[in-house]
Image (tube, helix red, strand yellow):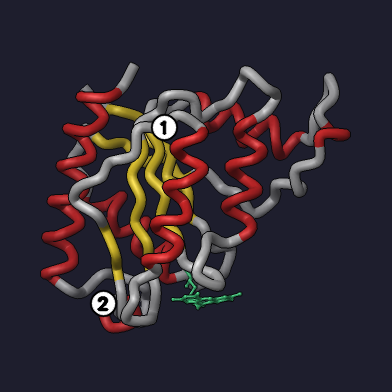
Amino acid sequence: MSVRVALIVGSLRNGSYSRAIGMAIKDLAAPELELIPVEIGDLPLYNPDLETETPPPAWARFREAVNGTQAVLFVTPEYNRSIPGALKNALDVGSRPYGHSVWQAKPAAIVSVSPGALAAFGANHHLRQPLVFLNMPVMQQPEAYVGNVADLLDDQGKLTNEGTRKFLKTFTDAFVDWIEKTKG
Ligand code: FNR
């Protein structure tokens, strides 16, 4: 049976490496992992004053989209050794209204991506902190750190590195098992 998984990319940039890796994962993942890109770039900054009967339409669209999935895959770059603000905002938007978090108990996995050698280790681990509070069981192994990413993609952003492809397949197969073990 296939599982609907929200694919959330932490970069808003046209030509984002993280998005390219996210789309590569979507293509190579086992058929039981149906990855559904959910955009975060149009979400107004979280402000409790806007949390009325009619919240911003982009918040409502985002919450509905994540609610329609059973798990979440985060693919993110690192900004200043942490996660991009846009991704943190998306976590905040999804976490409210209080008691109606779209993240509640959803299995999650993280892929961090960087053109640098440290592979966005800081972002990968900073993201784990709010996910603990949001009660998301986050896959611990295998971890996924995609470093020197520019060397792994062609000019069209297609993944050309066979070793990375094999690793990401192993990672997504493990995520299928993780979802099966931890979903509510
Ligand atoms: C960066 N970059 C970056 N890279 C990194 O490995 N560690 C870091 O802490 C940072 N910090 C950082 C801050 C800001 C504000 C920007 C704009 C960039 C570089 C970053 O990895 C690079 O721009 C990637 O291309 C971003 O990922 P996407 O947009 O290609 O997915």
Q: Residue at x 15, y 42 (%)?
A: 173
Q: Secondary structure at mark 1?
A: loop
Q: Residue at x 36, y 73 (%)?
A: 157
92 relative to 131 in the view: left or right: right
Q: Residues within 10 Å of mark 1 (few under 14, many from 20)?
A: many
Residue in the foreground of this view, choosing between 40 and 108: 108
Q: Residues within 10 Å of mark 2 (few under 14, many from 20)?
A: many
Residue in the foreground of this view, choosing between 141 and 11: 141
Provide residue 9's location: percent of width, then percent of height. 48, 54
Quadrant the N terminus occupies: top left
Residue in the foreground of this view, choosing between 16 and 170: 170
Provide residue 95's location: percent of width, then percent of height. 61, 32
Instruction: State which tag comes first along the sequence, 2 or 1.
Output: 1
140 relative to 83 in the view: left or right: left
Against 109, is 25 above or below? Answer: below
Q: Which residue is mark 1?
A: 136
